[in-house]
């Protein structure tokens, strides 16, 4: 009942938000779960440093995140502080990673909604979903889902894509015209293609100290493997069930290598202490921003995650797809394209096969350029600049602003 009352109050705020005068100069940024993360983070940093004509504001429901952003010398407020609420109602643009609720759905009336998203579209998402745990939300569209998840049904005004190839599916999934999809690439990937000196400056200024500490540690190994499985709606504990940590640690010891486990931010990990027993295994929390760290790894181990395509942007990297649950996974989630024709990397369907690939250290990289071109086109690490310039010079919806 309390939750219902809170949402009713939210809808009242939303009605009021449509009457607020919005400023084209004020840009609001936010991310899922109140974190300082993903595409919104990187675009926000760029705009804060390079665009004096814009007043960028990071809005979050978490005081910890606000303090983190402020410590980097950037403007941030908690959403329901007086200033945070003011900027939420006055911002002409909302830049977010998934839905307007990354900032606040209920304060977003008449703001231009720019969905930066968080990965290329290999899997069926949103209104292309036709089965599985999200069926009620996207297929049946029940009244309960509509009431408690209104942000899902709000169509973005603009959507960031990578290529026309991707735009076709994104437009269908979000029910918008293809002309509203911006094929510029993702801001979070700019750091992967930066010159090393520029990336080091970014890390020193905007990342927590632990990021630099991890990089120094990783550079002491011959090879760093990074395991990043996608999120399963079933929220299973992936690591304990499908990795033999004893055998993995011994294999890493023989190679003078390090194995880093990084779960999806939504994944439930029941026991973290187990990973501390092993000298050559490290566990990173799901909310760690992995993008400043990716250039300092050598081999990505993933499955159906879009991080595969981000990783392929960097030269000299290798990929293994660990598909231990392929048959079960496709029962709940389908793909936009034939899977094996649109991925790159060695395939392993069991832990023994995965270990064998790592022991041989022999990777077929023949189709890497083809897949990279298909999903990224000409993107070369300039997404932040292109997006900032596009919206600074924006002329549509001007009548809505003062």
Image (spheres, grey):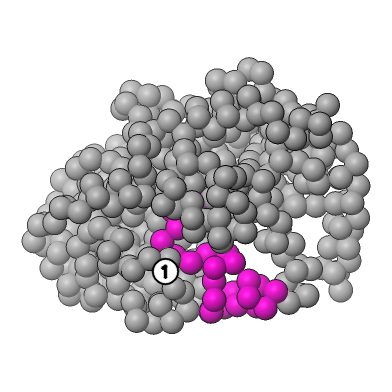
Dividing the picture into quadrants, the one containing residue 280 is: bottom left
x then y, percent, for residue 383: 46, 34
User: Can you identify the residue that label 1 sits on?
Assistant: 335
Q: Residue at x 30, y 76 (%)?
A: 324
Q: Is residue 341 left or right of residue 366?
A: right
Q: Residue at x 15, y 53 (%)?
A: 366
Dividing the picture into quadrants, the one containing residue 322 is: bottom left
x then y, percent, for residue 130: 54, 76
Read off the magenta span: 118-141
Residue 374 is a magenta residue: no
Q: Nearer the viewer, residue 213 or 21?
A: 21
**Residue 280 showing in the rendered view:** no
x then y, percent, for residue 385: 50, 27
**Residue 241 showing in the rendered view:** yes
Quadrant of the drawing holding the N terminus: bottom right
Residue 133 is a magenta residue: yes
Q: Nearer the viewer, residue 256 or 13?
A: 13
Q: Secondary structure at mark 1?
A: loop
x then y, percent, for residue 238: 39, 72
Q: Residue at x 42, y 69 (%)?
A: 335
Q: Residue at x 75, y 41 (%)?
A: 111
Q: Nearer the viewer, residue 259 or 133?
A: 133
Q: Is residue 24 left or right of residue 294?
A: right
Q: Nearer the viewer, residue 342 or 148?
A: 342
Q: Is residue 388 left or right of residue 120?
A: right
């Amino acid at each position: 009942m309390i939750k219902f009352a809170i949402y009713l109050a939210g809808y009242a705020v939303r009605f009021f938000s449509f009457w607020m005068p919005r400023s084209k100069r004020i840009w609001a940024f936010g991310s899922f779960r109140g974190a300082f993360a993903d595409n919104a983070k990187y675009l926000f940093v760029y705009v804060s440093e390079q665009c004096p004509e814009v007043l960028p504001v990071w809005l979050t429901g978490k005081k910890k995140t606000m303090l983190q952003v402020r410590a980097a010398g950037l403007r941030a407020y908690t959403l329901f502080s007086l200033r945070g609420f003011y900027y939420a109602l006055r911002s002409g643009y909302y830049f977010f990673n998934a839905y307007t609720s990354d900032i606040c759905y209920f304060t977003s009336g008449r703001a231009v909604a720019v969905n930066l998203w968080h990965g290329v579209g290999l899997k069926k998402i949103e209104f292309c979903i036709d089965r599985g745990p999200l069926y009620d939300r996207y297929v049946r569209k029940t009244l309960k889902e509509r009431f408690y998840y209104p942000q899902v049904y709000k169509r973005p005004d603009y959507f960031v894509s990578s290529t026309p190839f991707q735009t076709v599916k994104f437009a269908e999934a979000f029910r918008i015209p293809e002309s509203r999809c911006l094929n510029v690439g993702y801001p979070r990937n700019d750091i992967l293609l930066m010159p090393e000196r520029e990336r080091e400056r970014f890390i020193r200024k905007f990342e927590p100290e632990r990021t630099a500490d991890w990089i120094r540690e990783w550079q002491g190994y011959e090879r760093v493997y990074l395991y990043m499985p996608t999120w399963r709606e079933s929220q299973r504990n992936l690591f304990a069930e499908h990795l033999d940590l004893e055998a993995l640690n011994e294999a890493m010891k023989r190679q003078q290598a390090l194995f880093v486990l990084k779960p999806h931010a939504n994944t439930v990990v029941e026991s973290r202490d187990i990973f501390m027993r092993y000298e050559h295994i490290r566990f990173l929390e799901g909310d760690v921003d992995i993008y400043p760290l990716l250039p300092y790894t050598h081999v990505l181990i993933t499955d159906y995650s879009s991080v595969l395509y981000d990783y392929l942007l960097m030269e000299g990297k290798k990929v293994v797809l660990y598909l231990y649950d392929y048959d079960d996974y496709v029962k709940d989630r389908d793909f936009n394209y034939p899977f094996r024709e649109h991925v790159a990397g060695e395939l392993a369907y069991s832990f023994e096969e995965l270990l064998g690939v790592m022991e041989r250290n022999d990777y077929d990289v023949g189709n890497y350029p083809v897949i990279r071109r298909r999903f990224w086109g000409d993107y070369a690490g300039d997404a932040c600049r292109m997006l900032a310039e596009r919206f600074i010079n924006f002329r549509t919806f001007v009548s809505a602003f003062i």
